[in-house]
Amino acid sequence: MKVTIKSPLDMHLHLRDKEMLKVVAPLSAKSFCAAIIMPNLVPPVTTIEDVVAYKKRILDAIGKENFEPLMTLFFKNSYTYEFLKKAKEHIVGIKLYPSGATTNSEGGVSSMDIEELKETFTAMSELNIPLLVHGETDGFVMDREAEFGSVYEQFATNFPKLKIIMEHITTKNSVDLLDKYDNLYATITVQHLFITLDDVAGGMLKPHLFCKPIAKRYEDREALLKVALSGHPKVMFGSDSAPHPIDKKECCGCAAGVFTAPIALQALAGLFEKNGKLENLQTFVSDNAQRIYGYSPTCKDIELTKEPFIVPSSYEDVVPMFADETLSWSITSIV
Ligand code: DOR
Ligand code: ZN
């Protein structure tokens, strides 16, 4: 059995910098045609010069591979209309982090008060720059995303022309918001379609499955599966592949992030096939994103075949999801 995905897109990706960038960027560039690159470097990507220089480092790291890094800025409420007008040609969106919510987000926003965000959100609406959001409060860890729901509702209602992407959603609550507001969209990761909190902490603690937002309940995973498998038009694949070196994962104080870039398409093919929805994989990993972002890549096609793929135990010093396990689908051709 085979399936060919035309121009697969990863709409949420962490590529890091320096040595780590050199390890992980070629892996994404092999399987994907383009990806939205997260700006949470240290320090974060906040100027046009930062964006241009980081894009160049990414292109250098991937060499000859045909892959487009789609760049983002790290949200600051000091961004003015004039600045954003100039930035627009270099970016596809702006990523908003609540301060301290996750890895390298300390410079994020400390208040979700509409008055404080209004000027930048209005400029983004007028310039048609999407807002990408890490939607978690600082509440109880299992409730953080659901609590953020009211913030999404306020953003969506007050800025009806602003395209808002709820990044890496993990709850039924977020899924329900999609059909309530025209301007809300979502990305979903691989791991949140496969695991619940039981897999992370129900038995032996699994640091390589620890990420933010943390995996939730069975009913949440069901809701995510339903919209992903059905090809819901407002849902896109965004891996949130977030590599950390092994000593930052297997230690006291494990960093948040699951590394999925090199196994994502193979795992998704297996999942969609198992659920009898292989015909919707193209929609989930490319077509919806193209329509939502108005982006038309002409790039590579990836052929996947139902043949065993033994996932490596590591890529340099980064451990992927499903390390040492055998997935039932492999990438067999890249055209
Ligand atoms: O688990 C996560 N890791 N979630 C995020 O939001 C950020 C990411 C990272 O950068 O490591
Ligand atoms: Zn992320």
Image (cartoon, grey):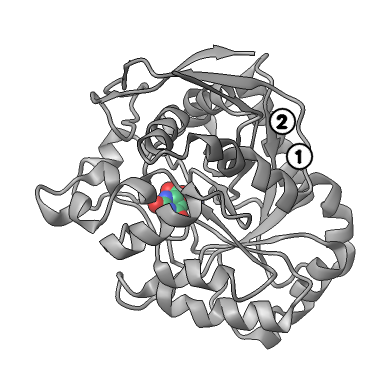
In this rendered view, identify the residue nearer to me: 272 or 64: 272
The kind of residue tagged 2 is: Lys
Q: In which quarter of the image is residue 154?
A: bottom right
Decide: marks 1, 2 in contact (CB < 8 A)?
yes
Q: Which residue is drawn at 45% across and 47% down?
A: 189
Q: In the rendered view of the protein, which quadrant contains the C terminus?
A: top right
What residue would you read off at disc 1? 52
What residue would you read off at disc 2? 56
Q: Is residue 132 visible?
A: yes
Are there few (<14), some (14-19), or many (20+) residues within 10 Å of tag 1?
Answer: some
Q: Describe the element under mark 2 as helix, strand or loop.
A: helix
In this rendered view, identify the residue nearer to me: 4 or 41: 4
Q: In this view, does 188 lie to the left or right of 218?
A: right
- Is the shortest distance between ligand 1 and the CB of mark 1 under 8 Å? no
Expressed as whole percent of the image width and height from the top left, the position of residue 172 reads 41, 68
Expressed as whole percent of the image width and height from the top left, the position of residue 67 reads 67, 26
In this rendered view, identify the residue nearer to me: 74 or 197: 197
Q: In which quarter of the image is residue 325?
A: top left
Tag shown at residue 104: none
Tally of marks: 2
Q: Describe the element under mark 1 as helix, strand or loop.
A: helix
- Is the shortest distance between ligand 1 and the CB of mark 2 under 8 Å? no
For this orientation, the residue located farthest to the front is 276
Q: Residue at x 46, y 40 (%)?
A: 277
Q: Which residue is drawn at 57% across and 39% down?
A: 285
The kind of residue tagged 1 is: Val
